[in-house]
Image (tube, grey):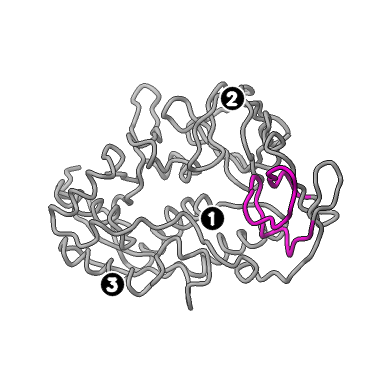
Amino acid sequence: MEKKNLTVLVGISGGVDSAVCALKLKQAGYNVIGAMMKVYDGDIKTIANSCYGADKNKEIADAKAICEKIGIEFHLIDCANEFDRLVFNKFKSEYKIGRTPNPCVLCNPLIKFGAFPLLARKSGLKFDKFATGHYARIEFDKNLNKYLLKQGINQKKDQTYFLYKLTQDKLQNILFPLGNIEKEDVRAFAKENGLVVHDKTDSQDFYKGDYAEIIEAKENRGNIRHINGKVLGTHNGIFNYTIGQRKGLKIAYENPLYVIKFNLDNNEVIVGEKEYTYSNTLFAKNLSWTFYDDVPDIIHASAKIRSAGQKAECKIFIENNGARVEFLEPQNAITAGQAVVFYDGDVVLGGGTIDKAV
């Protein structure tokens, strides 16, 4: 099918990446429609500000202006109920039990590439493909007869960590026009084409703020205890801490201390010196495979345990409805609730949710 007969729905966020995504597709000959997700109602007190900026009305205005400049339709698709049910409620429940979830990992497969295009179709929009400004690549391998999800050429901006739940049936209908482009070239292209968002600051991955208010948690005081057993202070809620955290502990000690783990039974934050933050092994659950049809029992791969982290060589053992991941070198601050994503070179194999570190 010729490009001129293909209609692409582009997720417009109000930022430079989605703007350049839409413009490049239009210049390539596609029929382009712009649409923005509405993922919350009320003020900016939820993690949904990762999808917008500090001012939701300005983001919507910017998105409209982008579409007008490019010469494409603009639509606002209400995904608020789905976001609350599938992402925000999960985020809150995980934080309440001392885990550190990543809302972007939840939001991408369930909302951005799930409910959003589905609700767009239900609203009457007709399109063949769905595109976003993610820095990732999708390639079809004829020998394997499958779509490969690959890292973007700029690995500092690569966003495949958030996309490992995309399955073959979704990959075949997605376009990532920015996967082969450097970020500075995206901004330069936007400026050359008169897009006013060419120098707009990138949005943050997720909310920074008062988590007690966000997760509707009351103060829940407990001890901060050194791993050697000594009580060093108190905390106002485990949800205020994350594994590997150093700043904000508000305790005095002879050595720098880090959050090592949580004792949920006794409502305690366990701290210790730097060496205690390293682990060789993690257990993951809720596995999702982008690459495999039949998953081998043992996989030699590399893995990322955080979005901004580096890949590390590992061996993956599939067992007990999950995976045991053994790293060749110890990894710092493996955090329950975060994603572990597996790679073969620049190809995403799949991933899962970190359950615990050993």
In the image, what residue occupies the spot 53% across and 24% down? 301
Q: Which mark is residue 314?
A: 2
Determine the CA span between mark 2 and mark 3.
46 Å
| Dot 1: element | helix
Q: Position of residue 23 (x, y in %)?
A: 19, 53
| Dot 2: element | strand
Q: Amino acid at mark 2?
A: Cys
**Label 2 packing within 10 angstroms: few (<14), some (14-19), many (20+):** many
Mark sitting earlier along the chain (2/1): 1
Please give the range of residues in magenta: 233-262
Q: Is residue 105 left or right of residue 253?
A: left
Mark sitting earlier along the chain (2/3): 3
Position of the C terminus by quadrant: top right
Q: 60 or 144, which lies in front?
A: 60
In the image, what residue occupies the spot 38% across and 27% down? 145
Which residue is label 3 attached to? 61
Q: Amino acid at mark 1?
A: Pro
Which residue is label 1 attached to? 103
Q: Is residue 70 left or right of residue 329?
A: left
**Up-down relation of residue 252 to residue 311 (above or below):** below
**Up-down relation of residue 336 to residue 292 (above or below):** below
Q: Does the segment drawn in magenta span residue 249? A: yes
Determine the CA span between mark 1 and mark 3.
25 Å
In the image, what residue occupies the spot 48% across and 69% down? 80
**Label 1 packing within 10 angstroms: few (<14), some (14-19), many (20+):** many
- Main SS, magenta region, reads loop
